[in-house]
Amino acid sequence: MKSLFGIKYPALSKDTGKSEDLFEHVKTGVDSVEGQDCESLKPLLILLDCQKRKSYLSWTDGNDMLLQTGNQTEVSPISRVALQGTLLKVVVKPEANEYDNVMVLDVANGVSPMSWKLGHTSLDLNGGAVTLLCRSVEAQSQLRLLYDMCMLARFEYMSLRKALTATVISTHGSRISDISTVLLAQHSYKDWCYISIDGEWVKAWCHVDRSPRNAGTHKGRRQIKFFKDDRSLTAKNLLCFIPACDEDKDLFLVEDQDPNLSESSPTDGFADLRFRDHLKAAHVDGASLESSMEALLSRLNTLRFVGDIYWPGSTASAPNGSKSPPISFSAGSLSPRKKRRSAVEAPSNEPSGASSHKRSKSGVSMSSVHHPDEGDYEFKTSEILIKPIPHSGVHHLESLIRCALPMMGCLSLYGRPVHFNNSRMDPESMLFGLPRLPVIDFFAAEEIPSLFEYTSTIAGGSEHLNRTIAAFKQFLAQRIADKGRQKLTFTTLSDMMQTGSDFSVFTSSSRSTSNSPLI
């Protein structure tokens, strides 16, 4: 099978031989996990699992810090702070009933990048919904460190998600019958989808302007637009739009956040992966690994765009991006849950080819499509979730790929529309900086202090998390070309075995130095 990316992924050991009949019982097609797909996905699943267990920061003495929630004037002294994976856990006194005194926030999911504000003595999270206050000079430095570590966890999470997206497009896209047409298409993409507005799914007509002829060009008025329906693509009917001119933007796949999508699916997608068996490079039962991957892929049905999204209306009604955009939509919008459940649990028997697609056709001509000017829209947000609706006989992964590729081309992301950049050394690649197992770190331990100093200088005055993430990428681009980097200290899988799953990047635990942190 020819890969769309031409990616060669690292294996767990030197023995990479595959038995031809290892997964002979697995069905072929986009809706299955083939043997070679398992080999491509396995390293990323391990890296995702390691990042989820990684302890970025842990304090047991936070007496100089206070927690304030919402508009309450009352504050509570903090006793413990921990950041494991992307989950920030803050425990306040008293601890008689820990459940009532614990705040947990996912710093990489469900957080608006425009809703964090770091001050000299405070850190506002989610538009002031949660505020951390400090009452000493030492606590001020701790607060800055906490912010930086949250950004590091967010950067590594998003980077791994982009690498997973590249792998899924490469493996599953190769089995789409007309994938060449999708890649080379010079016409606009138009189809129904759901977008998330203030936590609710709204059915929308997606219109993606055709891709430019040359990669990286920002001339013209290329946009991704979402309309209330397909009957009138005018300004009055516009829900929101994404311009191609913004530089700090990303698009990648994420799982469904609804645990009821499939009752048999594990809650996090990794329940069937025996973590310590991976650390020991032990044999993993093929059926269990296959089951784990299929569970993850079954919920991988959402596109997450990180960047500027412009909305009609005034910012006065939605300060700091904490409220919903000032738009209205029909109460009769279909529920995406039912659509997704039917697509996953009761797939059609029709073949998944181009001939079986039954997409709605918009009767509106291209000349009548409204092209908004971002200068006319003051209100903007910095993230949006998009769920393509699978059509009859089309698997949800194919629908994702058919939607993602035109969007990447329109926005000139990752080398599109000409070809994908697949180098780990290229900042514009979806695989940029991806660690090579057994290394699991994007940055060496010696680089982290300099990284935080750099990001503070470049994006210190910005309240936009995306600017900070962009600064992380710039710093990594400078460091990754250093030939002496391979002699620095990177955490490995064996280190996790020695220190347990709760290792920290700032502990003095035993570490191994990899000969080559990156491919």
Image (cartoon, rainbow, N blue to C red):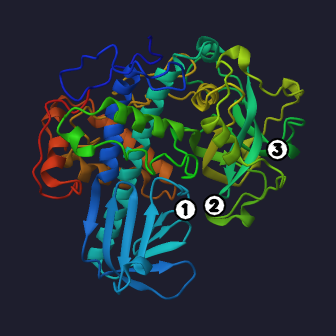
Q: Residue at x 23, y 57 (%)?
A: 502
Label 2: few (<14), some (14–19) or many (≥20) C-alpha neighbours in 10 Å: some
Task: Give above or below for 253 relative to 60.
Answer: above
Comes first in the chain, label 3 or label 2: 3
The reply to whether callout 3 and callout 2 are in contact (CB within 8 Å) is no
Residue at mark 1 to residue at mark 2: CA–CA distance = 7 Å
* Label 2 sits on residue: 321
Comes first in the chain, label 1 or label 3: 1
Helix, strand or loop at mark 2 = helix
Q: Nearer the viewer, mark 3 or mark 2?
A: 3
Tell me if 338 is positioned left or right of 483 in this view: right
Q: Is residue 250 visible?
A: no
The reply to whether callout 1 and callout 3 are in contact (CB within 8 Å) is no
Q: Is residue 361 visible?
A: yes
Q: Quadrant of the C terminus?
A: top left
Q: Quadrant of residue 359?
A: top right
The reply to whether callout 1 and callout 2 are in contact (CB within 8 Å) is yes
Q: Position of residue 48 (x, y in %)?
A: 36, 42
Q: Nearer the viewer, residue 26 or 510?
A: 26
Q: Position of residue 27 (x, y in %)?
A: 49, 21
Helix, strand or loop at mark 3 = loop
Q: Position of residue 50 (x, y in %)?
A: 29, 46
Label 1: few (<14), some (14–19) or many (≥20) C-alpha neighbours in 10 Å: many
Helix, strand or loop at mark 1 = loop
| The disc label shown at residue 115, or none | 1
